[in-house]
Image: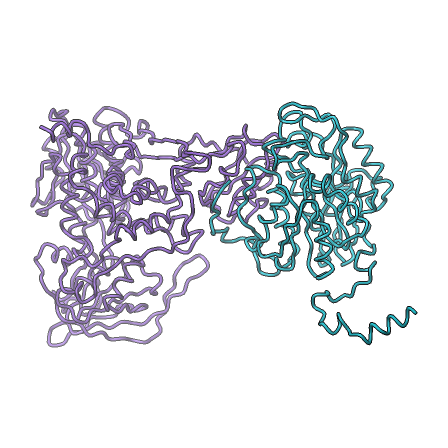
Amino acid sequence: MKATDISNPEYFHKVVDCQYACPAHTPVPEYIRLIAKRRYSDAYMVNWESNVFPGVLGRTCDRPCEPACRRGRVDEEPVAICRLKRVAADNKDDSNVDSRMPDIPKEKNGKRIALIGAGPASLTVARDLMPLGYDIDIYDENAKGGGFMRSQIPSFRLPEEVLDQEVNYVLDMGVSQIFNTRVESLKEVLDKGYDAIFVGTGAPKGKDLNIPGRAEAGDNVHIGINWLESVAFEHTEDIGKKVVIVGGGNTAMDCCRTAKRIGGDEVTVTVRSTYEAMKASPWEKDDTLAEGIPILANHSPKEFLIEDGKLAGMTFSVVESSYDENGKRTIRDTGEVVTVECTDAIMAIGQDNAFPWIERDIGIEFGDWELPVVNKTSFQSTNEKIFFGGDAAFGPENIITAVAHGHQAAISIDLFLSGKSTIDERPAPGTNLVSTKMGIHQWAYDSAVVDDDRQASAHLPVEKALSSRKIESELGFSPEVAFTEAERCLNCDVQTVFVEEKCIECDACADICPTNCITFTHNDGSPLRDRLNAPSLNLETDLYVSTDLATGSAMIKDEDVCLHCGLCAERCPTSAWDMKKFLYTVTKAGDNPAPILVEQTTPRKKKQAEAAA
Amino acid sequence: MSFIKPNIRHPEAPKNKLGLSTKSYEGAISTLCAGCGHDSISAAIMQAVWGLDIEPHRVAKMSGIGCSSKSPTYFLNKAHGFNSVHGRMPSVTTGANVANRDLLYIGVSGDGDTASIGMGQFAHVIRRNLNMSYIVENNGCYGLTKGQDSATADEGSKSKKGKVNPFESIDLVALALELGATFVARSFSGDKQQLIPLLKAAMSHKGFALIDVVSPCVTFNNHAGSTKSYDYTREHVQAASVVDFVPMAQEITLDQIEGSTKDVQLHNGDSVRLSKLDDNYDPTDRTNAIHVLHEHKNQDKLLTGLIYIEPESDNFHEILNIPDTPLNQLKEDVLCPGSSVLSSINDSLK
């Protein structure tokens, strides 16, 4: 095997599993350490620079980081990254954060940009381009910004003030808000002479269920995302006593819990898949069950029952799912039919992109499923002025993906308007690799690996939580619990860096390593993974391979289960190992590497002067 | 020194026949200098005992005084142990062995503990063929007292400050061969591939087994001019044979090893397999072993591997006709059968 090139930033980036899995590549261990030190505003800013909505995401993120977390591989459960993020947002010092918002040039650069839809993708584009002096108009059909974070996520999961604050951090940069305005024609917007347009309109079309009785059931059958939006904007204030939800995703969970709060006494979720295979996040399912809402798995909707011209119930075929060795599902009807009485039924069975408002003759090529053709790197459509991001680009994903799209689209727009290639001239990531050595066996991070189990977040008592759709049901971590949880982080960004020239091959590192990650063996071309000191079964993680040492052996480290405890470096007599903190930041538009925020504990000078005056 | 070792281990760590992973064979975190060869030997001992499927509590770790003799704390913390007086580990082990012959006795000593203050005890325990593995962690210096030359430091080798050692060294392997040891091996802490099978063979040998392990002192004896440094040892090492330990249950398939091989069967059916680097080398020929050892020394080579083995020999218990049941398990009426038996013995001697 070839020796590892650690000068390639992607190598160490991949070792930081959480950050690598995050679409926006938020430096997770960095902010977790700040939370442990109770530096909440700093932790918040590390997040904000990267993901723009820490308070929102700390409550609602799909958490791609957590299944990736190394803790989950070596211990029972991953670090509760999402809820730790919320701790930073809940405990930050608002005036400190306000003073650290970027400076917006008063003198504009003369370029005008339209953002269509005021959801997370568009707001991220605005957040990145406003500091560069662009003039930005943001369009949305609703009265407030936030997009589906506002319309589809119920307030008991995401309080309005949390959302307002983070949406306003962006809008207050001086974005001109054209709200209560539904864009019906992209051509019209194009004709207004914008230099670039970003489409971040989400996936706004909820699917209906066309089974017998649908027409007769009429208005008592609701489309999940539309119904949630209608509740959020207070057009709908109540629902019938008995409600059936069809669908097993997070929207279904939001619908049932909302229904339970606004009049639904008997709310039932039905899903065609097995309970385990449901698309909803496990914690959302737990919260649903905790509120006394049953989930009927293996129920495939058959028909709507109508009595006296009104919806009276639904029938379901009970099915069995089986999976072949390729994971392909086959559904078999058992012949059993179940009837669930209901006064209302909510369909939460998926959503689609829909672009009836985009003319087909303005240079945007449409491909499969009537989706625009969008470049996956630049987010640019075939009309070079028009960019897409968020769910509008490649179909329904989640907030953090929309943010990641927004950052990249902002880079492209800035490159495009500077006359540069949106593909070839994209900025490199910001990286930093610094030793954490403080003393003989002292490191600038808590190298000891704690044994604590994952901490659970406190909830309101169910009766209280169900009393209003606006009371947040989850209380989050207290600072004490947050500290315990933060200490569970293995600091995967503190890298084990090996220097071949210093190694005397005494084996001390290999002997002390608690997980036997390190092996000294000949790297002669035969497969290495079979010859390591410990089983090397996770082929997703890399082997760190040194060049050949004096005796002809090479150091091989399996990154899979390294605890980053630093014992290899502590036991090394020649400092051939060092524990170096690797900071990887995604460079934003304007070629500005994200600041190394840890050092940035004081407000920016100019703001300070303003505050003093 | 490091303070804390995480409790987390590799989630797929292999288990031995007892269902234990190597975690059950660990000890306290080492307080020896970082990079000490002794820690590598401790790691090899853990691997060997684990690999032999021996329960940790069936082992007794015996030691004297010195850096080496601290090291039993750092492996097998479920085992019995006795950290005895300087140089007196062999006699304490003899006592323990007489009381309970069922345990596996691992003696860990150093060059000072063996070749200086403990020399007399060392000579006599060999002569008695006590059933134990005697491991010398040999670094050629007194590390615990700032690195003075020990009795195994080679003549002409330099101390860290540059002083040349004027005295002839004691070669423990040559001495053990002369004294009639039934298992004599030499190894290097930096070569676990050789050391682990040697340890397994020594622990399976019925009788006295010596392994003299060159174990560099990184703090006081790992410089140019030292003959016990990592670099010097690697440059001068010459293995007598490539050693492998073959448990009895494992089918022997000779074609797995290239070149000529020789299996030496141990008393319990296990065997030590040697793939010989020199076809004339016979590890069961004591005279030849002494000759080859000296030959290598004259060529400035350090001969390692299994140098001599006498698989069938009477050990201490057999020589003294000690009962098969450990004495500590015998009931009082058997151990002290009473005045009538004493009288009959006395009568028989009249």
In this view, A234 is above or below B293? below
From the viewer's side, name the closer residue of A13 and A393: A13
Q: Quadrant of residue B229?
A: top right
| Residue at 58 percent of width and 31 percent of height | A548
- The quarter of the picture where the C terminus of chain A appears is top left
Q: Quadrant of residue A595?
A: top left
Residue reaching furthest right? B350
Counting from the top left corner in percent of width and height, residue B276 is at 78, 41
From the viewer's side, name the closer residue of B211 and B87: B87
Counting from the top left corner in percent of width and height, residue A151 is at 15, 52
Residue B173 in the figure: left or right of residue A92 = right
| Residue at 22 percent of width and 46 percent of height | A89
| Residue at 19 percent of width and 34 percent of height | A100
Counting from the top left corner in percent of width and height, residue B326 is at 72, 65
Q: Which chain is purple?
A: A
Residue A569 in the figure: left or right of residue A267 = right
In this view, A313 is above or below B321? below
From the viewer's side, name the closer residue of B340 and A586: B340
| Residue B67 visible, this orientation | yes
- The quarter of the picture where the N terminus of chain A appears is top right
| Residue at 80 percent of width and 45 percent of height | B308
Question: Count of labels shown?
Answer: 0
Q: Which chain is cyan?
A: B
In this view, A17 is above or below A290? above
| Residue B262 visible, this orientation | no
Counting from the top left corner in percent of width and height, residue A388 is at 22, 39
Q: Name the image colouring.
A: by chain
Q: Quadrant of residue A260?
A: bottom left
In this view, B235 is above or below B99? above
